Image (cartoon, rainbow, N blue to C red):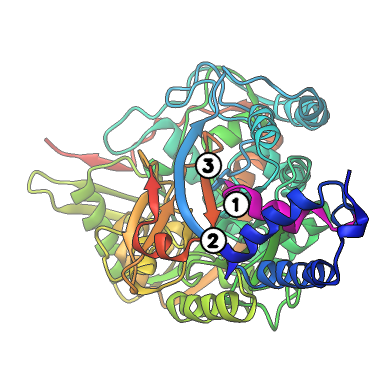
């Protein structure tokens, strides 16, 4: 059907080259038939930056001269110049690790992330370090949102503020991003997280993917997770790798918590036999993760062979 | 140029169909991922700095540096981490923590604290000879752990002693002294200079990390009661540095070893 229209259109254009009817039509729908319609989305991400605003000092034993918001900003800027469809995400533990946090309680971290135009973040356990009230108090400095689907904040100050998911539209691509947090009991003092209720990440993820895929009709589903990459000594503990295996329809899991430095993103076969990408970029802003998604309308090709280059 | 006379009704009709079909097909057209590329980019010196960001951070950094560098006390020699069963820095930390805990516990519970036990691994630096600043406290204690008082029976203090003998680490310890004999058995056990009573309840100052099972100090799990003093260990250091002029050198023996 589409092919037919395409051919007829070509004939039609030839016949009415300067027709006012053509000029009056919006160019976009017609253009989309002209060449192979590939859309390009770039996901950039950090995790566990832990208040590392400055680069590590030159005499640091482990990471000399690495990281730093100012250099990260120029890197992100150069990527934005090359592709305007960018989502910049953080997988939590923004707080705690340098005196910037002890002195300003996260104010500067949020302000700088806003200057870098972060789109979204999820909450890590250390983001509760000044209590849920301390986190809430810094939110006016954040021009980006937080998502967490498995923390029920109903009886806390974050009720209706931290939502389960957010949907973005970047150049016609609909992207659904939901957040998952780690179990707080035993990790964070109850007096810090107060009445926050932790719900099962797998069940939550199933609900989220259903909503994002069916109700919100997203083209891409991303999970921003602070569950941790993998627990070798505790394989039953939920992690990004086990989450990827036990769920379907998640295209990308961006993780944190375990400060895992990976050589490359991990490809996991999910419950439906499709491929889910899991990535984490260590900690302290030493690395920026970059995942590029290329979209077209070819369903057949996609289902049979989604090319993943890592 | 187009000859408008050739613009037949059929062609005119076709424009409408085309327009509707185009919008319809685009609205319905779903996007599929056909290719994914993933990598990580190191943030290194090779990248340019961003002036606007640098300028924004500067006043925050200057304020913190000025505060961290403010001189609070003087050390006449290095207060270091050398020693098998006790160190100068461990003795100092356990003494000042025990004093702080007692002060707060007296106010809240009208009781004194008998013992302080912390962990050697929790001391992340030393006090170097010279100026002692707020930065020193951040280097000694970069973590946010807070002060806990646990109520332990004398029996658990005996478990604590067994742990210390087995661990053979200079964990900061105050209020409790004993001697390890040739057979690795404790003797001359004194708490606040009194013999240990297995049935008595002792109040032990520690941090939340150890209380919650850190460093396998499992005797804390048997605490009959726990009091969170809501006071960060770093602030114990800072408040102590503000209160004194010269840092004392504490070389007294708390755990003695017979050869």
Residue receiving disc 3: A290
Disc 3 on helix, strand or loop? strand
Image quadrant in which you'd find residue B252:
top left
Residue B195 seen by the camera: no
Disc 1 on helix, strand or loop? loop
The residue under the point 43% across, 43% down is B122
Image quadrant in which you'd find residue B191:
bottom left
Chain designation of label 3: A
Q: Is residue A181 left or right of residue B196?
A: right
Q: CA distance from mark 1 to mark 3?
A: 22 Å
Circle 3 crowding by C-alpha within 10 Å: few under 14, some 14–19, many from 20: many
Residue receiving disc 2: A297
Position of residue A36 measured from the top left corner of the image (x, y, whole percent): 57, 49
Residue receiving disc 1: A37
- Indicate whether residue A42 is drawn in magenta: yes
Tell which circle, 2 or 1, labels the residue nearer the N-terminal end: 1
């Amino acid at each position: 059907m589409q092919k037919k229209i395409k051919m007829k259109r070509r004939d039609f254009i030839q016949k009415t080259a300067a027709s006012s009817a053509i000029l009056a039509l919006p160019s976009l729908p017609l253009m989309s038939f002209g060449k192979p319609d590939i859309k390009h989305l770039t996901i950039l991400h950090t995790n566990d930056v832990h208040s590392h605003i400055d680069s590590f000092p030159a005499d640091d034993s482990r990471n000399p001269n690495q990281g730093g918001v100012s250099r990260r900003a120029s890197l992100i800027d150069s990527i934005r110049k090359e592709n305007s469809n960018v989502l910049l995400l953080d997988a939590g533990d923004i707080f705690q690790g340098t005196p910037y946090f002890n002195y300003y309680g996260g104010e500067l971290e949020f302000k700088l992330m806003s200057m870098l135009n972060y789109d979204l973040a999820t909450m890590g356990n250390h983001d509760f370090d000044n209590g849920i009230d301390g986190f809430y108090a810094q939110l006016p400095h954040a021009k980006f949102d937080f998502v967490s689907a498995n923390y029920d904040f109903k009886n806390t100050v974050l009720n209706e503020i931290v939502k389960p998911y957010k949907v973005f539209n970047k150049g016609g691509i609909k992207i659904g991003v939901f957040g998952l947090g780690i179990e707080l009991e035993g990790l964070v003092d109850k007096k810090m997280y107060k009445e926050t209720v932790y719900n099962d990440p797998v069940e939550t993820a199933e609900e989220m993917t259903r909503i994002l895929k069916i109700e919100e009709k997203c083209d891409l589903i991303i999970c921003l997770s602070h569950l941790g990459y993998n627990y070798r000594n505790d394989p039953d503990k939920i992690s990004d790798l086990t989450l990827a295996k036990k769920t379907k329809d998640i295209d990308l899991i961006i993780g944190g918590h375990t400060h895992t430095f990976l050589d490359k993103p991990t490809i996991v076969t999910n419950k439906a036999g499709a491929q889910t990408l899991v990535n984490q970029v260590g900690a302290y802003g030493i690395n920026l993760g970059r995942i590029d998604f290329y979209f077209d309308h070819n369903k057949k090709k996609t289902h049979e062979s989604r090319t993943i280059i890592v | 140029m187009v000859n408008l006379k050739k613009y037949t009704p059929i062609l005119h009709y076709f424009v409408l169909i085309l327009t509707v079909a185009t919008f319809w097909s685009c609205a319905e057209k779903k996007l599929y991922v056909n290719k994914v590329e993933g990598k990580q980019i190191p943030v290194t010196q090779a990248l340019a700095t961003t002036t606007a960001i640098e300028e924004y951070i500067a006043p925050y950094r200057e304020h913190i540096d000025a505060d961290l560098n403010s001189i609070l006390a003087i050390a006449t020699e290095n207060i270091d981490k050398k020693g098998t069963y006790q160190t100068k820095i461990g003795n100092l930390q356990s003494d000042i923590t025990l004093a702080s805990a007692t002060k707060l516990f007296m106010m809240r519970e009208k009781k004194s604290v008998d013992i302080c036990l912390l962990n050697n691994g929790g001391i992340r630096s030393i006090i170097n000879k010279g100026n002692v600043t707020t930065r020193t406290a951040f280097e000694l204690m970069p973590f946010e752990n807070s002060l806990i008082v646990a109520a332990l029976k004398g029996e658990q203090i005996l478990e604590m002693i067994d742990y210390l003998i087995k661990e053979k680490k200079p964990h900061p310890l105050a209020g409790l002294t004993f001697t390890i004999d040739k057979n690795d058995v404790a003797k001359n056990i004194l708490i606040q200079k009194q013999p240990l009573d297995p049935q008595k309840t002792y109040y032990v100052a520690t941090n939340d990390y150890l209380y919650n099972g850190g460093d396998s100090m499992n005797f804390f799990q048997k605490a009959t009661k726990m009091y969170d003093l809501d006071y960060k260990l770093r602030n114990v250091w800072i408040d102590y540095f503000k209160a004194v002029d010269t840092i004392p050198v504490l070389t007294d023996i708390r755990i003695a070893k017979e050869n």
